[in-house]
Image: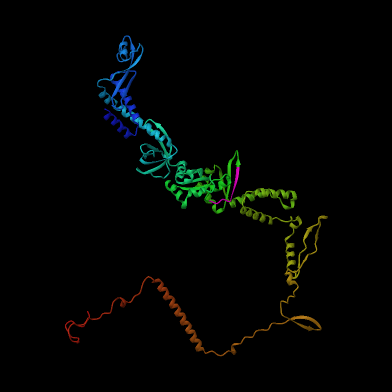
Amino acid sequence: MRSDFMLAINQLCAERKLAPEVVLEAVEASLISAYRRNFGAVTNVEVRIEPDTGDVRVYAAKEVVENVTDNKAEMSLPEARQLKPDAVLGDVLMVESTPRDFGRIAAQTAKQVILQRIREAERDAIYSSFADSAGEIANGTIQSHDLHSGDVVVNLEGAEAVLPAREQVPNEKYRRGQRLRAYVVEVRKGTRGPQITLSRRSPALLRRLLELEVPEIFSGAVEIKAIAREAGSRSKVAVHATQEGVDPVGSCVGVRGGRIQNVVNELGGEKIDVVQWSQDMASFIANSLSPAKVMNVLLNDVLDGGKTATVIVPDRQLSLAIGKEGQNARLAAKLTNWRIDIKSATEAAEKTLGSLDQIRVPPDEMDLLSLAEALLTRRDGMEGFSTEQRQLIQEAVREDLEDWPQEEPTLEEAAVEPEAAVEEAKVVAQAPSSEVQVAPERLARPEDGEEGEEEPETYGSRRPAWLQDIEQPAPFIEDEVVEGGSLGWVPTEPALTEYPSWADEEPVDMADLAWVGDEEVEDEEEDEDARRERKKKGKKRRRREFDPEEIVPEFRPAPRRGGGGGTGGSRGGRAR
């Protein structure tokens, strides 16, 4: 009898992918339920199935008593000693009580129970197989898409998983039958089977995909330190090499970007920036703003205010560092867990100069100690800036220092009337070229406070030193003459250049002049005609003039077939 029963059990186990022991336990439980339903409620009933023969036997527990009141639950002492010679009152014996037609009744009654237990066993098996898959990547096929809730049902080779709308990538399209790779968020045991939740926007999905594509990450030679992701748009990954001689960024990117391109294709074209992780937070923050170039990073780690970093970038790199709608700066802040304030070099220089102006001290009021203190303060204020920034700041400070007055003007000098200034300008203008006299300045004497005039200072010639010893010639031609016994200088008049008059020239024939004039007029008319012709050709450039004779061939009469060369004949000689 093993034949049919055990073959059916084995076939059922193969179809449902279940263990035979689980199916046999389900069958035994269903037979006990069927026995109690058809033959009365018995407290202790056991059903035993022989694996070899397939026989089904029912054993009921009966108590040994003197007076039997219930034959299904009690038995007398003589009946008990037939089964067990040393039985006494109060013993409980397992007595076979298989009904005569129990096989037919059991088959009809236990059918639903067997199916139910098999389904429960299937759910437990599926849950056991997926219980350890949380945190891994699962491959499946899209089974359905609920347009109302937006959830997607994915078939994972025998199990159904759900991709909720909150875990989907924006603007990503899903169609039935499409292959999908997703991250398993959690696996829970439910009444209708395991509840598997998937995700396509989790940063852990990017981590697992990089582990699959990059062998160095899978082996541990390269470690992923942090991930910041905006699903469907852009992501940043910070990597660090745990072994010397390994380039973490190059390992993730691959030859010609082959490795990272596979991950980008899997995520639907999402841009991925792989940056170098560093223990130095300034370097790490500068790397996190890639692809923008960073000039300097100033860290401000305050317990109450939080971690704030001021990043200075070139003016042309400001928009690139911030990114579209601030995306690059936002991802860098998530990656580093610092608040990042990005400023251009010009803005940072202006702010620094403003702070330096507040501590500026005029030079005439500085002693040695205050000057040293101001210089130290300026040096501290310029710490943290790059060489280019320091040059910009120093040039701006130098321009400000040039505008400072070396000595403050006195009240008397400031109150000079405009007429006095004009007279001084005239005195300076009338001075000879060899010597320059400076007009007397009005200065206040410290001892009596009265106004006085200083002696005018005389400066040497403004010519270079190597020209002062050379005698310069006079600016005009002169001859030495003696007039009345005295020596003087009389300028001589320059000789006039004589030009030939019209009378000395040869006479010109007026006819020749007229002919020359007519020829020039004709040339001008020809030039005017040529210009007009060129203008017409320019307007009619696309129109081509042609001769009809070039297209239509010349008509020639056909020769006569008959004899004779005369013009007579019925058909000859005339063109029609």
* Residue farthest to the front, as pictured: 85
| Left or right of 459, for residue 202 | left
Work out whether residue 295 or residue 456 is closer to the camera in this orientation and state it.
Answer: 295
Report which quarter residue 54 is drawn in.
top left
Asked if residue 61 lies in the magenta stretch, the reply is no
Work out whether residue 53 or residue 11 is closer to the camera in this orientation and state it.
Answer: 53
Q: Quadrant of the C terminus?
A: bottom left
Q: Position of residue 533 (x, y in %)?
A: 41, 76
Instruction: Magenta stretch: give its range.
Output: 292-300
Asked if residue 299 lies in the magenta stretch, the reply is yes
How are the colours assigned in the image?
A: rainbow
| Left or right of 3, for residue 373 | right
Say if residue 298 shows up in the picture.
yes
Residue at (63%, 49%) from the top-left corner?
352
* Residue farthest to the left, as pictured: 570
Q: Quadrant of the N terminus?
A: top left
